[in-house]
Amino acid sequence: DGRPPARERLRRYLSLDTTSGMLLLVSAAVAVILANSPWREAYHEILAYEIGPESLHLHLSLSEWAADGLLALFFFVVGLELKHEFVVGDLKNPSAAAVPVIAAVCGVAVPALIYAAINAGGDGAQGWAIPTATDIAFALAVLAVIGSHLPTALRSFLLTLAVVDDLIAITIIAIFYSHGFSLTWLVAAIVPIALFGVAVQRGLKNPVVLGVLAIAAWVCVLNSGIHATIAGVVLGLLVPVKGKHAIADRMEQRLHPYSAGFAVPVFAFFSTGVTVVGTSITDTLTDAVTIGVIAGLVLGKAVGIFGSTFLVSKFTRAELDDNLTWSDVFGLSLLGGIGFTVSMLIGE
C-alpha cells in the first residue's frame, strides 16, 4: 500500500515529542497510583530488587538501573541535541547561547536562597540544594504535550537551561552531599571518554565498539560517585555535527525512539512512585522544608530564570532569540519549576 514497514512507523511515532511526553506522564501517573494502592508494598519490592555483577560494583536495584542507566541514554541523546544547537542551531550565536546559561545559573541560585531563608537555623537547612534543578525529562515532556506549535527556539532554550542547571546541581551533590567520591574512578573515566571522542571524530561508526567505550565510561563515572548521567551528556557533546564524519544526526535519529519511547517512561515508572498514604497532608504542607521546596521551585525558578533573562537581554550584548516572546520566556520559567530527579537524589 506504499506505507513504510510497521517497525519504521513505530519508530517515527515514538520519535514524536508528544508521544514520548504522554508515555512519560502516563508512566508517572501509574507509578503514583500503585505507590498509594493496596499493592504499594509489592511495587516498592520491585523497585528494590537488585541485579547486576558485584565485581563491577553494578549490583544495583531496578530503580537505580532506571535512574543511572536508562537515564544516561536519555542524557546522551540530550547531549547530541545540545551539540547540534550550539554548532548549527539556534544557539550557535554566543550572545544567544549566553542567555539560557545565565538563566540556568540564576535559576539555581534564587531557589536555593529562598529555601535557605525559610529554613535558616532549622533541621532542614542542609537541604538548600533540593529546589535547584529542573527535571529535564519531565519539563520537555510537558512542553511537548502543551505546545506542539511553539517555536523551536523555546525547546532549545529549555534544553540548554535544564542541562546546565542539572550539571550545576550534580556538581553541588559531588561537593556538598557525596560521601563515596572516588578520584581514581573519575580519572579512569577519562580513558574511555577520550577513546570515544577520538573514534567518532575520525569517523568510526561501528556501534559495538562505540557502545563498549560508552558503557566503560558510564561504569567509571558511576563508580566515581558522580551521577552517571554526566557520562551521557559528555559523550553526546563529543559526537561531530559538521564535516565528513558528522554522525550526530544519524545517532540521534536511531537512539531517540529508544530514549523517548522506552528509557524515559521506564525511568518515570521506577522513580515517581512516592507514597503519601498514611501521612498527614496538613503536617507535610506546613513543614518548613515543604514550604521551602515549593517556594524555591515555583517562585524561585520563575524569578531567577525570567528575571535574569530580562536583565541580561536589556543591559548586556546578549540577545533573546528573535522567535521568542517574553510570554514564552515566562511560561518556560514556570516549566523550570518542575523538579524531581536531582531533587530526590539530594534528598537521599
Image (cartoon, rainbow, N blue to C red):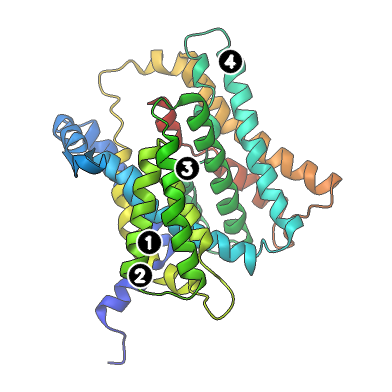
Q: Residue at x 54, y 42 (%)?
A: 167
267 over 208 or under it: above or below: above
Q: Which residue is mark 4?
A: 118
Q: Which residue is mark 2?
A: 13
Question: CA–CA distance between discs 3 and 4?
Answer: 23 Å
- For marks 3 and 4, the one nearer the N-term is 4
Q: Residue at x 65, y 38 (%)?
A: 105
Question: CA–CA distance between discs 3 and 1?
Answer: 18 Å
Q: What label sits on residue 19 in the rendered view?
A: 1
Question: Circle 2 — which element?
Answer: helix
What's the amino acid at mark 3?
Answer: Asp
Q: What label sits on residue 135 in the rendered view?
A: 3
- For marks 1 and 4, the one nearer the N-term is 1
- For marks 3 and 2, the one nearer the N-term is 2
Please tell me which residue lies in front, 37 or 137.
Answer: 137
Kindly report which numbered mark, 3 or 2, lies closer to the viewer in this rendering.
3
